[in-house]
Structures are given as structure tokens and as C-alpha cells.
Image: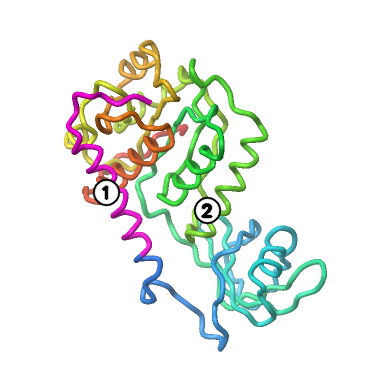
């Protein structure tokens, strides 16, 4: 992806500095003992979160949940958890329950809930990432999706363009596993959604419905300058092209639909680098703004 050489080199440095600060603040918040709630049980909570899709709202204290499959293997073979160790289960929809391991056998373990299900609403602006990463190789797509998960993107959609026309189903399955692992590692209660690939032409109606749609490309104004003309929205689109950038026709289509072209600096950035730099910048900008009363984009 090309970035305009006319933009000050300080722009990219600012973006990367903001990205570093975001990771620093996020790490500090997640490791602040005062920010984490625990249940007194006499045993140390040795683990993070474990995915369990069937957590239901309502009274769960005292309920026993059977954990099998990948989560059972990870808990017992990788983390070496034992009976009476305290763990947390989440459902990827904001639901969290704390409890401990009651019993372990060859096929699974029994988790007893020590609290009722806690339901947490999403805390960030709902940013939807569209990126042309279908042709990336060597784990670069994995890295892109992992970091989008950690930064708090609501969804990632593979964007099919003239220069990145496809993405394999095998890669989609792998990326789903990357998202789940990243969600557990960063203790994210709302799992990021990996959406089905869409053609770049199909972005027009989504852009038209959104008051915040940013397209990273060459020969555009710096992103921090562009953001000064926006108020905080409840949702927005972050759009990054493939290697070689969007074609002129694709860019014209998105601009006509209402998107704003932005630059990330004078240097050529890889697709994954541009994605994370733009997402982190918009996240930090959004955190500083007063919320708008407008409703989220429909259909995203």
C-alpha cells in the first residue's frame, strides 16, 4: 500500500506513537489489580478466560458446566490446571462467569459456577475493518486479525478487490481460531466477528449509511487532520486496500459514496501495518471525543 510522499514524515511517527501508547495503556489496565473483580474462594485464579458458548443469562451460581474439547485440552495439558483451581468462562457475547474446577477425568472437566453470569456491554466505538488481505502470506493475515482483535475492532471483513480477488476457505477457518485465541489472551469479553468476504463494490451502501468512513490511500490528507472534522460516532468503517493499493476506479466509487481518503505518512506500508496504524489512531481519537446520539450503521 502506497502512502503519499507529500505528507510530513511526522504523521507516521505520530500514528506509531499513538499505537504504542494504546498498547501501553491497555496492558496497564489489564494488569491493574484494582480493575479486576475476583471471587473469594481460597484458591488462586491461575488462568485467563476460556470460551464456552452455552453460558446463559440468569442464575448460574452453583451450576456445573461440563468443559470438553479444545478448551479442556488447553486447560489441563497446556496450563496444567488442577481440581479447585479458579477459572473464568466467557461466551464471546459479553457474558462472564467465575468458578472453579470441581472434577477432572479423561474426557473433560466439571466447572462449578461461584457467581451468576455477569453481562458486560461493549465499551468502545464499534469500528468495522475492511481490508484487502486475501493475498497476504507467511502469517501476515494472522497478525492483522490478531491485532485487530486486541485493539477492539468490532469486526473484520476480507475485502475482495481487483488486486486481491480472493481468500481461501481454509484461511478463514484458521483466522477464526486466531480471533478466539487473541480474545482469551487479551481478556476480551465480546469476540470480534470475522465476516464473509465482500466485493469492494458492495461497500457503497455501507459507506453511504456511515458518517465515519476512512479509506487509507496515497495522496490524501493526514488522518489526524481529517479526524478534526468529525464528531464521535457510535460506529464507523476503517478501509484498507490490498498490496498495490486500490485502483482509481475503486477509490472514486468509495469517495462518491461518502468515504474520506486519509494518509498515514510518506512511506509505503504493508497492508497489515496500515490496518493497525489506522485502527489504533481512530480508536484513540474516539476515546477523546464526546459520544454522538446517532445510532449505529445498519447492516454492518
Q: Which residue is label 2 attached to?
A: 182
Q: Nearer the viewer, residue 272 or 52?
A: 272
Residue 178, percent from left and from top = 57, 47
State the SS at label 2.
helix
* Residue 138 vertical placement versus 201 (above, below): below
The segment highlighted magenta reads 1-27
Query: Would you say 271 lies left or right of 183 here?
Result: left
Residue 51, percent from left and from top = 61, 59
State the SS at label 1.
helix
Is residue 6 within the magenta segment? yes
Q: Tell me the crowding category of disc 1: few under 14, some 14 to 19, or many 20 or more residues within 10 angstroms, Cα based.
A: some
Question: How far apart, in angstroms, are the residues tagged by discs 1 and 2?
Answer: 21 Å
* Residue 298 vertical placement versus 29 (above, below): above
Q: Which residue is label 1 attached to?
A: 18
What number of labels is visible? 2
Q: Hey, which quadrant is residue 236 in on the image?
A: top left
Is residue 211 within the magenta segment? no
Q: Nearer the viewer, residue 130 or 27?
A: 27
Amino acid at each position: 500500500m502506497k502512502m503519499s510522499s507529500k505528507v510530513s514524515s511526522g504523521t507516521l511517527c505520530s500514528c506509531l506513537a499513538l499505537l504504542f501508547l494504546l498498547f501501553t495503556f491497555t496492558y496497564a489496565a489489564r494488569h491493574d489489580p484494582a480493575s479486576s473483580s475476583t471471587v473469594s474462594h481460597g484458591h488462586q485464579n491461575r488462568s485467563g478466560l476460556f470460551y464456552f458458548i452455552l453460558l446463559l443469562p440468569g442464575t448460574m451460581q452453583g451450576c456445573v458446566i461440563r468443559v470438553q474439547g479444545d478448551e479442556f485440552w488447553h486447560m489441563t495439558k497446556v496450563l496444567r490446571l488442577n481440581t479447585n483451581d479458579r477459572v473464568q468462562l466467557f461466551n464471546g457475547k459479553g457474558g462472564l462467569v467465575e468458578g472453579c474446577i470441581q472434577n477432572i477425568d479423561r474426557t473433560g472437566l466439571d466447572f462449578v459456577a461461584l457467581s451468576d453470569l455477569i453481562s458486560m456491554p461493549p465499551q468502545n466505538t464499534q469500528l468495522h475493518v475492511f481490508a484487502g488481505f486475501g493475498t497476504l502470506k507467511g502469517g501476515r493475515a494472522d497478525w492483522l486479525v490478531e491485532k485487530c482483535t486486541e485493539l477492539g475492532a468490532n469486526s473484520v471483513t476480507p475485502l475482495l478487490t481487483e488486486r486481491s480477488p480472493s481468500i481461501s476457505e481454509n484461511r478463514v477457518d484458521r483466522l477464526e481460531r486466531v480471533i478466539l485465541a487473541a480474545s482469551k489472551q487479551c481478556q476480551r469479553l465480546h469476540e470480534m466477528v470475522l465476516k464473509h468476504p465482500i466485493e469492494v463494490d458492495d461497500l457503497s451502501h455501507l459507506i453511504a449509511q456511515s458518517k465515519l468512513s476512512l479509506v487509507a490511500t496515497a495522496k490524501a490528507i493526514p488522518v489526524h487532520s481529517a479526524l478534526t472534522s468529525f464528531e464521535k460516532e457510535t460506529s464507523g468503517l476503517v478501509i484498507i486496500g490490498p498490496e498495490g493499493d486500490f485502483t482509481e476506479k475503486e477509490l472514486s466509487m468509495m469517495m462518491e459514496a461518502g468515504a474520506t481518503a486519509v494518509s498515514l505518512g510518506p512511506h509505503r506500508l504493508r497492508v497489515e501495518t496500515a490496518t493497525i496504524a489506522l485502527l489504533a489512531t481512530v480508536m484513540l481519537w474516539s476515546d477523546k471525543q464526546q459520544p454522538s446520539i446517532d445510532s449505529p450503521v445498519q447492516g454492518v
